[in-house]
Image (cartoon, helix red, strand yellow):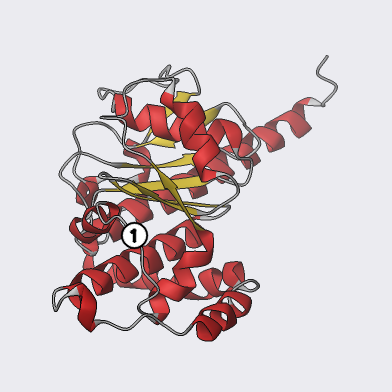
Amino acid sequence: MDTLAPADRTTAQTDTASQEWQIRVELAALYRLVALHGWDDAIYTHISARLPGDDHHFLINPYGMFFEEITASSLVKIDLDGKIIEPTPYKVNPAGFTIHSAIHGAREDARFVMHLHSDHGVAVSTHSEGLLPLTQHALIALPSISYHGYEGIALNLEERERIVADLGDKKTMILRNHGTLAVGETAAEAWLGMYYLEKACAQQVAALSIGRDKVMLAPAAAQEEVRQQVSTGRAKSAMLAWPGFLRQLDRRLPGYDS
């Protein structure tokens, strides 16, 4: 039974709408940032955000729009069963639904989920050793990385259980022969996790271009030191960097907040 007075109910509805719009703006910003960094893949790959106070609905890209075109108002709202909730001329990528519904449905802290097919991320996903401890970026990324084996294009809903199991409690994932993935409680956290992972992948590809025998792994003691150093403060660091990325978008690829 609804016990809220009409005025309280209106205020609650206004607050919910305001929160959803803020999530839409931040999600659209993530799409534009991926495009700005050259990590997009035409209309493919996806980034999603679960709506505040709602465990069943999340936002995802309209299937057919390039990442540089996506705005807050163009994002599509769907539920965990794949049903589109609000009118839109667009559909949703079925593979995107499979991956993102799995994680949103299983991880309360995964409010934002990013999945990419960048050249460097895909290249490292094919390497039998995965991400190597070659650079500081890699050492920062490694403690939060998990792996998921390739099963084909993610159209089989039964794969969702295995994606969730392989992700576990980690914040980033390398999908073998496929690409990269990052989750976060905030857009900032998801973005910075993906940023370090993608940077580390690019650095590894560059380093291995001179041959596997010619590169030095970081010393084991240093690897452990960095692990300890990044075990706290990641969310704070992400929130510190996020406004700068938004300012960069405002200068170079504005319009995401419309």
Q: Position of residue 113 (x, y in %)?
A: 45, 45
Disc 1 residue type (three-letter): Glu
Q: Position of residue 239 (x, y in %)?
A: 54, 69
Q: Is residue 257 visible?
A: no
Look at the picture and state if 192 lies above or below 176.
below
Q: Position of residue 169 (x, y in %)?
A: 60, 49
Q: Residue at x 76, y 32 (%)?
A: 7
Look at the picture and state if 255 lies above or below 112.
below
Q: Residue at x 25, y 22 (%)?
A: 89
Instruction: Identify which residue, 111 or 54, lies in the foreground.
Output: 111
119 horizontally vs 162: left or right: left
Q: Residues within 10 Å of mark 1 (few under 14, many from 20)?
A: few
Instruction: Identify which residue, 144 or 151, lies in the foreground.
Output: 151
132 horizontally vs 140: left or right: left
Q: Which residue is mark 1?
A: 129
Q: Residue at x 52, y 60 (%)?
A: 144
Number of numbered discs visible in the structure rendering: 1
State which quarter of the image contains the N terminus. top right
Look at the picture and state if 220 lies above or below 144.
below
Q: Is residue 232 visible?
A: yes
The residue furthest front is: 213
